[in-house]
């Protein structure tokens, strides 16, 4: 395989959950710029549609879908629509999550239904999306799954305890699933982003919190959505075909593990 083929994403059929906003929007745009055919699947279908229109306007291939990753029927529709439009599913980026909508507060104040909602989207959503795409990846004999966790897991960041717990679950899920599907030619890896200046994160953070975001990072600057794209693309490309069950930390060199 030529060096460039190892990193080639052109023609790949890529689903980005939560692809309507924030970091997922940037993944959708950058995968399309790399020549992939992209599905932006988001509970906010209008935002997903706008992402798809913007990508098509610059010559890329993308369609937007209203998808609730915590709903099995909705996720089945996502997989079916991808197969109908692109004929295959090569890459699943499990990026959808409940995060910025969650107030930062003591775990003693987290309502039980909010805890359940976070687990439903951030963990059950992962399970449902993987379950929906793996049969076609298995039939193809290859597939790439990238699960978005969080560097909170390494740092033990408090005050969104349900969120941090769910993102730790993403790592266990990734490791065990890697064993279940490796012989099918499917890799499953996770990425732990550091605090990233997505629109929603900025909107839900105070000035002091934002001002501290360069601190402790080897790179000496805050993290932007674009900083995550290279690692996610690597784990989606043939270059990472012998890597599975791994968690790659992308936080500008803050948590080192
Ligand atoms: N921004 C950060 O600092 C940061 C840090 C670590 C990890 N992450 C993770 O990176 C990913 C993207 O973060 P972001 O900052 O863009 O978050 P965001 O809140 O801006 O985006 C999340 C997206 O998921 C969608 N979504 C929510 N519930 C959904 C559901 N049930 N079904 C489908 N889509 C749903 C939202 O509409 C939104 O488009 C998330 O998994 C997040 O947990 C973010």
Image (cartoon, rainbow, N blue to C red):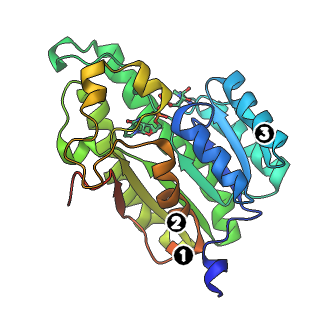
- Label 1 with label 2: CB-CB less than 8 Å: yes
C-alpha distance separating marks 1 and 2:
6 Å
- Is the CB–ligand 1 distance for label 1 below 8 Å? no
Which one is in front, 3 or 71? Answer: 3
Look at the picture and state if 199 lies above or below 131: above
Give the quarter of the figure containing the N terminus: bottom right
Q: How many marks?
A: 3
Q: Earlier in the sequence, mark 1 or mark 3?
A: 3
Does residue 209 show up? yes
C-alpha distance separating marks 1 and 3:
26 Å
Percent coordinates x, y for residue 98 in the rendering: 43, 27
Per the image, the residue denoted by label 3 is: 63
Look at the picture and state if 91 lies above or below 97: below
Look at the picture and state if 185 lies above or below 212: below
Look at the picture and state if 153 lies above or below 186: above
Q: Nearer the viewer, mark 3 or mark 2?
A: 2
Quadrant in which residue 25 is drawn? top right
Report helix, strand or loop for mark 2: helix
- Residue drawn at x 45%, y 64% is 180
- Is the CB–ligand 1 distance for label 2 below 8 Å? no
Q: Earlier in the sequence, mark 3 or mark 2?
A: 3
- Residue drawn at x 28%, y 29% is 211
Which label sits on residue 234?
2
- Residue drawn at x 43%, y 60% is 189
Q: In the image, is 235 to the left or to the right of 60?
A: left
Which one is in front, 184 or 30? Answer: 30
Percent coordinates x, y for residue 136 in the rendering: 69, 59
Does residue 101 show up? no
Which one is in front, 253 or 43? Answer: 253
Give the quarter of the figure containing the C terminus: bottom left
C-alpha distance separating marks 3 and 2:
23 Å
């Amino acid at each position: 395989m030529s060096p460039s083929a190892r990193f080639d994403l052109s023609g790949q059929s890529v689903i980005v959950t939560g692809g309507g906003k924030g970091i997922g929007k940037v993944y959708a745009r950058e995968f399309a710029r790399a020549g992939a055919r992209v599905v932006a699947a988001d509970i906010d279908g209008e935002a997903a549609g706008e992402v798809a229109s913007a990508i098509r306007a610059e010559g890329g291939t993308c369609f937007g879908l209203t998808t609730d990753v915590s709903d099995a029927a909705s996720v089945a529709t996502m997989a079916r629509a991808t197969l109908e439009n692109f004929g295959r599913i090569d890459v699943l980026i499990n990026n959808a999550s409940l995060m910025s909508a969650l107030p930062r507060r003591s775990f003693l104040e987290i309502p039980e239904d909010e805890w359940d909602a976070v687990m439903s989207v951030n963990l059950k959503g992962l399970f449902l999306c993987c379950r929906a795409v793996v049969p076609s990846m298995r039939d193809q004999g290859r597939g790439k799954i990238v699960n978005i966790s969080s560097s909170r897991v390494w740092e033990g960041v408090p005050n969104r305890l349900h969120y941090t717990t769910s993102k730790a679950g993403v790592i266990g899920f990734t490791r065990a699933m890697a064993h279940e599907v490796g012989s099918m030619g499917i890799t499953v890896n996770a990425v732990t982003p550091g605090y990233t200046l997505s629109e929603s994160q900025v909107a839900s953070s105070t000035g002091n919190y934002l001002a501290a975001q360069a601190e402790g990072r080897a790179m000496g600057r805050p993290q932007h959505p674009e900083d995550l794209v290279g690692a996610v693309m690597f784990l989606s490309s043939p270059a990472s075909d012998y890597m599975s069950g791994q968690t790659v930390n992308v936080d500008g060199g803050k948590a080192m593990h």
